[in-house]
Amino acid sequence: MKRRVGIRCDAGPATGVGHLVRCVALAEELLARDDEVVFLGDLGGLPWAAAQLERRGFPLIPARQAPETLSAQASGLDLGAIVLDSYALPAETGTALRRAGIPVLAIVDGDIRGQSADLYLDQNLGAEERHTGLPVLAGARYVLLRDEVRRLSATPSSGRPNVLCFFGGTDATGVIPRWVGALVATAVPFSATVISPSGLVPPPGLPISVLPPTDDLPRLMATADLVVTAAGTSIWELLYLGVPTALTWVAGNQRAGYETVVGRGLAAGLGTDPEAAVPVLRELLASPETRLSYGKRGRQVVDGHGRERVADALAMIK
């Protein structure tokens, strides 16, 4: 039976776009099942983020902030279920929605932040061991991937390595210039595409292209020989594609994911100091074998069917 599902998430220059990206993946699956999807939130004036919804036909409605008023808004929209994906929501939000008879799926990254839900989703590696006594979909079996990612596979180049460097859709912590500097300091020939919302000016005479946030990111990932990024939502797309990846972390909530992914040998660990990471980057740029070993291991972890499993579970909540 067709139902309307609300997705409560935000994006913005400070919060990034990771919550939105994974929610879009789930929304695509729900739409394919003939459900209706409406987003409730604020995209922080980011044109790229707004385009993610507009070109898929998903409406965006400004969300009420207080738990009881959001609950009333959800009831007025006749929502059959709601997905919560935000670190900033009051802890009472889920309780208010459930009290109104609206089933709640809460997407979390480790800490549930006191949020009440009928079902939780934590797609991070190792999540199976972190949640006890909760109804939870845990681990990489439940990774949410967009259509445009699932249609791709890695196509590495030969010769000079092609590097993609990005830090979410906004580079909220402004670290891109230092990581580009670290790549240059390796003195190993490479070409690079850098995603920078601030219009980074690359060092002169080097084959480094700078692009604003773009819908073409999945293709750029799939054609890269090495990706330098933070341990956010994009890591699951990279593992699925089998793209060799070198990780840092730029926010506290990324550290656990960084340590797990790097600890399992699925990506190279750069730490948080670009200058200290130059030897690791030098080895990755100089050794195709080292790069490919990371890509092969990563590809075995994410099978690309997580969103179907999540949608199945969501349909069971009454």
Image: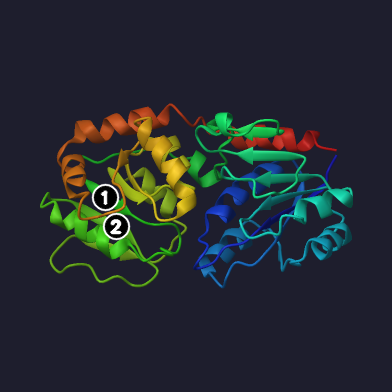
Mark 2, other Cα within 10 Å: few <14 / some 14–19 / many ≥20:
some
| Residue type of the residue flagged with mark 1 | Val
Which of the pair 155/144 is nearer the observer? 144
Badge 2 is on which residue? Answer: 193
300 left or right of 128 in image: left
The residue shown at (40%, 39%) is 259
Which callout, 1 or 2, points at the residue further toward the start of the chain?
1
Identify the image quadrant of residue 191. bottom left
Image position of 306 with respect to 169: above or below: above
Secondary structure under the numbered disc 2 in the rendered image? strand
Q: Which label is found at residue 163?
A: 1
Q: Residue furthest left?
A: 187
Q: Dividing the image into 4 quarters, which one contains the C terminus?
A: top right
The residue shown at (21%, 46%) is 281
Q: Is residue 266 visible?
A: no
131 left or right of 199 in image: right
